[in-house]
Amino acid sequence: MSCGTKKGLLIVVSGPAGSGKGTVLSRLLAEDNYRYSVSATTRAPRPGEVDGVNYHFLTEAEFRRRIAADEMLEHAEYCGNFYGTPKKEAYAVLDSGCNLLLEIEVAGAAQIKKKYPEAVLIMLLPPSFAVQESRLRGRGTETEEKIKQRLARTREELTYIGDYDYVVYNYDNGIDEAVADIRAIVRAEAHALSRNPEACRSYFET
Ligand code: 5GP
């Protein structure tokens, strides 16, 4: 696995339920120079989920051991379960020059920004709270109580928006646009002078 000689970009994408982040991220991952790192979690696998593919499914004791051993780049508790990004896996992707996409919730994203300030944090949102609500109801897969919980959780999540660098909207039928917006952000970030401190010297020396 190798994407280039420069270190890859760490890109965090968060978004509330109904933002379409799963679809947007799978489109980006189909691109050659994006990689995903498999998170660890203590939640039980859902039907069809495979250990090591969707998540590393761990016991709580093992998860706590890994935190204590400083093996997690970040971790957070979400709905009663632990989730975290294994450090080794994440750094291996970045060192290979590939861009690493993390789909994580807001508390973990805030930790990433502290530990790894060059990370780019993107919040993916439906066009409005009202649209989010109608998307969740439209799915018809969840109880009224669950929908209310998710909407309440969104208000909480958005208190973290100040930690993010960009906001991208996923309009109705807007997947293509949201994907293009994230590509544009990543492309611009790769050209930031702060990420190319040797630009002038190498210009004269190569
Ligand atoms: P789910 O249980 O539905 O797969 O994920 C629940 C939430 O956990 C989602 O918001 C997802 O973005 C978040 N999540 C998944 N992996 C990680 C991780 O490694 N770290 C953190 N902080 N959150 C994660």
Image (cartoon, rainbow, N blue to C red):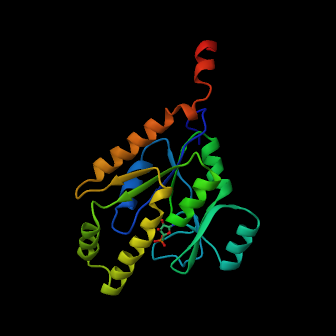
Give the residue at x 56% y 60%: 110
Q: Nearer the viewer, residue 75 or 42?
A: 75
Question: How far from the left and from the top, in percent, is residue 78?
Answer: 52, 75
Q: Is residue 125 something that shows in the picture?
A: yes
Rendered residue at 58%/54% (across/down): 113
Which image quadrant for residue 170? bottom left
Left or right: where does residue 106 sit relative to residue 64? left
> Can you see residue 105?
no
Q: Nearer the viewer, residue 185 or 179?
A: 185
Image coordinates of residue 108 in percent, x first then y, are: 56, 63
User: On the rendered image, what quadrant is the N terminus found in?
Assistant: top right
Which residue is at 54% across, 31% downward?
193
Relative to 181, is 94 on the left or the right? right
Residue 21 pos. (x, y %): 39, 60
The quarter of the image holding the C terminus is: top right
The residue at 35%/60% (across/down) is 125
Relative to 26, does residue 63 appear above or below in the rendering?
A: below
Along the viewing direction, whichever of 205 and 89 lies nearer the viewer:
205
Give the image location of residue 7, x and y in percent. Answer: 61, 38
